[in-house]
Amino acid sequence: MDVVRTVEQLRETIREHRPKGGIVGLVPTMGFLHEGHASLIRAAHARCDVVVVSVFVNPTQFNDSADLAAYPRDESHDVAVAAAAGATVVFAPEVTDVYPKGFCTTVHIDGPITDTLEGTSRGPQHFFGVATVVAKLFGMVGPDVAFFGQKDAQQCVVVRRLTRDLDLPVEIVTCPTVREPDGLAMSSRNVRLSADDRRSALALVRGLEAAATCVRRGQRSAATVVAAASQVMADHGVEPEYIAVLDPDTFAALTEVDRRAVVAVAARVGPVRLIDNIVIDPDR
Ligand code: AMP
């Protein structure tokens, strides 16, 4: 498996490995790869002839410079995980290659997709940063298919909107959230949790499970579902930054869980801000 730093090297590598008519898959990541990332790479490997894994901690999507500085990095580990999961090439550019001197284009996505929840907590700039780097990666790699994790549900909605609105010729595939055996959603940030924080972090998934149970028992009021989840989180000593019931395709808030819905949650646990979500279908 190759590791490349520049767009020229990347395009050359894709040309070398792509059979005639072959499908190119892209898995964008910020590195410190875990089993969640590996599942995306394996999904790409199963569908594509060439699998590009990008490893780039994108500074423009961080609203907190301390969070950016503390973001864990381990390139040799990332290369090993990507190779084992079936990547053809790891693309690990420098910040100055992605944002060279004079760079001044930003993709803005207006409205509730970017200004609620993560967009409120981290500022809409967060999703402008995400949209810009994803658009750039699509331009650099030229993928036929790109793979994203349901773990970042709002990001998936933003990327689908971006792709539709700009007519980008890329199919977006969303892969399920991979969890630790006790349910905690895998995240590169989990390494920053102390043993106590690690226990408290279960508040998020337990709250989401409580929400799902509530709906399974026939509850349809979003406010009641949210109250049930909040109570379980409070029992774990964690106060949510938000818990919301949303339309999975638009992220518009729902007052009734009368169709497929996403329950999304964010909370600070120790030094780390965690997010998680669950898809609930009341008809199943
Ligand atoms: P990140 O490196 O955190 O930016 O994530 C890169 C990609 O991996 C994104 O599409 C994430 O949604 C996805 N991802 C992160 N954690 C998980 C997980 N636990 N399960 C599935 N996908 C994940």
Image (spheres, grey):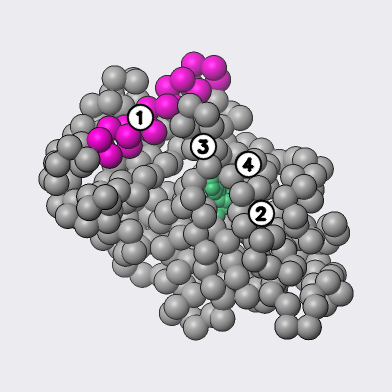
* Residue 195, magenta (yes or no): yes
Q: Amino acid at mark 3?
A: Arg
Q: Would you say the residues marked 2 and 3 are in contact, meaning their CB atoms lie under 8 Å apart?
A: no
Provide the secondary structure element on which disc 3 rests: loop
Q: Is mark 2 within 8 Å of ligand 1?
A: no
Q: Position of residue 69 (x, y in %)?
A: 63, 40
Q: Would you say the residues marked 4 and 1 are in contact, meaning their CB atoms lie under 8 Å apart?
A: no
Q: Is residue 52 left or right of residue 216?
A: right
Q: Is mark 3 within 8 Å of ligand 1?
A: yes
* Residue 135, magenta (yes or no): no
Q: Amino acid at mark 2?
A: Arg
| Residue indicated by mark 4 | 35
Q: Residues within 10 Å of mark 2 (few under 14, many from 20)?
A: some
- Position of residue 36 relative to residue 247, above or below, is above
Residue 136 visible somewhere in the drawing: no
In the current view of this chain or complex, which residue is farthest to the front?
Answer: 284
The mark nearer the N terminus, 2 or 4, is 4
Closer to us: 101 or 220: 220
Q: In this rendering, which labeled residue sits more in front, label 2 or label 1?
A: 2
Q: Which mark is residue 179?
A: 3
Residue at 46% across, 73% down: 162
Residue 15 visible somewhere in the drawing: yes
Q: Is mark 4 within 8 Å of ligand 1?
A: yes
Q: Position of residue 22 (x, y in %)?
A: 73, 77
Q: How far apart in space, not on screen, are marks 2 and 4 (Cα)?
A: 10 Å
Q: Residues within 10 Å of mark 3 (few under 14, many from 20)?
A: some
Q: Residues within 10 Å of mark 4 (few under 14, many from 20)?
A: some
The magenta stretch is: 194-213
| Residue indicated by mark 1 | 206
